[in-house]
Amino acid sequence: MSTSLSSQPDDVRSGLGRNLTYGLLDALGRAIVTGRYETEPFPTEAELAKQHGVSRSVTREAVKMLTAKGLLSARPRQGTVVQPASSWNLFDTDVLRWLLERQFSVDLLRQFSQLRIAIEPEAAALAAQFATAQDLRQISAGLARMEAAERGQDDTLDADIAFHVAVLRASGNPFYAQFREMVATALRTSIRFTNRIKGRTASVADHAAVRDAIAAKDPATARTAMRTLIGDVVELIETSTGAAAA
Amino acid sequence: MSTSLSSQPDDVRSGLGRNLTYGLLDALGRAIVTGRYETEPFPTEAELAKQHGVSRSVTREAVKMLTAKGLLSARPRQGTVVQPASSWNLFDTDVLRWLLERQFSVDLLRQFSQLRIAIEPEAAALAAQFATAQDLRQISAGLARMEAAERGQDDTLDADIAFHVAVLRASGNPFYAQFREMVATALRTSIRFTNRIKGRTASVADHAAVRDAIAAKDPATARTAMRTLIGDVVELIETSTGAAAA
DNA sequence: CAACCCCGATATATCCGATAAATGAACGAT
DNA sequence: ATCGTTCATTTATCGGATATATCGGGGTTG
């Protein structure tokens, strides 16, 4: 065939995933969330296979995975079509990552932080009630890493993530724990905005207050302390958005 | 082989989905969350195809969708294995439905309601700030349906769902709106427990208080009113659980 | 003229058989 | 005993054939 010399068919074969299907999944996912198919129709299965230089099997499996994540819908004769953004599964870590890594994602980051305002304070309150000794050790370990990062002995971002993830786990509720990956992804992305604006040095003292309240089994205080923490983040992003708009 | 006459290979061909792949997806999803593969290893691709009387293509696509939802993981030689429950995407409506519809799901329902305590009051607060005129009409429509249901002129459950979904939409935040399907699913399941215990007649007055606070653009009151509402649900479920345990 | 039915075109859905690649385990050499 | 090789198993990938669903056009009919 003509394209089989793999001149450069979008190169799904590189290193985008552990195999061709995941490579195509990633390429298509990014293309969809960046709106490439808002102006042109989504290709048919045969066209996709030819464009990316892969077999129909690989194509179909990638499309099925995107369907499972709510980004696509396939019907005979009608073809495969991109679903409206309202039906995308925003709590799928792949989808969230694609969305946050694209350009113009500050709005989305602000909206996700608005969600964190609801989730994390309540998670802290639950943690204050149900955290095991080991949960508490993990939270303290995260805090210790933040202090170490202050002295340049650890990575600030990783330490921050470790702390928040530990609190979510300590809630003892799988639905709260589910936000682990998402918060981690969002934090990694958000640093591109927040760190650019302030020196940050994310208030270790405020984080310590959360840990202390959880250790003291004081849900109300834990909730307020965490709310303060996330509130600062939101304010930082609001400022960023406002600055960009002005 | 013995099974090729399709005596009754689990019958994915019936009406479980709009095609074979979705039928198999549903059958396998239910089987996984009900723990069938905790005692026996997950079948290989070839075995699955034979057991359900479908081709390997259909099998592979269903497995890929389950992988996208976090339930499975496939590697050459190792085979396909069920992932630990902690990596299942609980915010996928299929996964949540499979989990809630299985036996012994009261615990999960309680935990999801604990999440609603975080989400819905905050959504109500956001709605009080940002709801459009149309959002408000939708909320009022939901309330009207609840009143009608009181008089036996509408379905209580559908009306309740319509109200909560309208509030989530009115938040103007896609992450909150994402909970629509999940709350709907959870409510439909929860009625099997809550309705069994009380006459319910879910406090229309309490719902009206939420609507009024949103209409008055009073976030704090909207938040507290919604918190009261969900708090009642949790209490109801706690009672149910306690009764079952005792 | 309008309603209905039938047929063809098109895209996904399904089945199939062959080959490639990855990987863990058994086996053998040093 | 350790290390490397071979082998068996399972998923990954390929591509061709056929089935099925569905939209739209066109012809027939009341």
Image (cartoon, coloured by chain):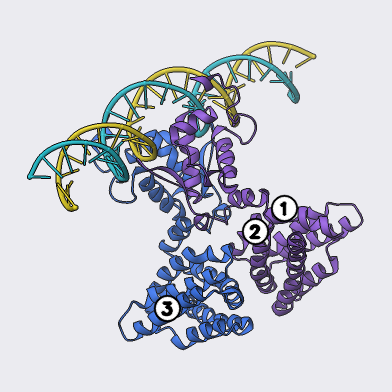
Chain colours: A blue, B purple, C cyan, D yellow
The relative height of residue A226 versus residue B11 in the rendered view (above or below) is: below
Residue B195: % across, % down: 81, 56
Distance from disc 3 to disc 2, alpha carbons, whole Å, reads 29 Å
Q: Viewer-proximal residue, B241 or B196?
A: B241
Mark 3, Cα crowd under 10 Å, few <14 / some 14-19 / many 20+, is: some
Q: Is residue B225 left or right of residue B17?
A: right
Distance from disc 1 to disc 3, alpha carbons, whole Å, reads 39 Å
The relative height of residue B36 versus residue B184 in the rendered view (above or below) is: above
Residue at the image position 72 percent from the left and 78 percent from the top: B218
- Which subunit holds the residue at mark 1? B
Q: Residue at label 2?
A: B108
Residue B132: % across, % down: 69, 67
Q: Which type of secondary structure does the marked residue at label 1 adopt?
A: helix
Residue at the image position 54 percent from the left and 30 percent from the top: B52
Amino acid type, mark 1 = Thr
- Circles 3 and 2 on the same subunit: no
In this view, the mark in front (1 or 3): 3
Residue at the image position 61 percent from the left and 35 percent from the top: B18
Q: Is residue B211 left or right of residue B168?
A: right
**Earlier sequence position, callout 2 versus callout 1:** 2
Q: Which type of secondary structure does the marked residue at label 2 adopt?
A: helix
Residue D12: % across, % down: 35, 40
Distance from disc 2 to disc 1, alpha carbons, whole Å, reads 11 Å
Q: Residue at label 1?
A: B189
Residue at the image position 67 percent from the left and 54 percent from the top: B105
Q: Residue at label 3?
A: A141
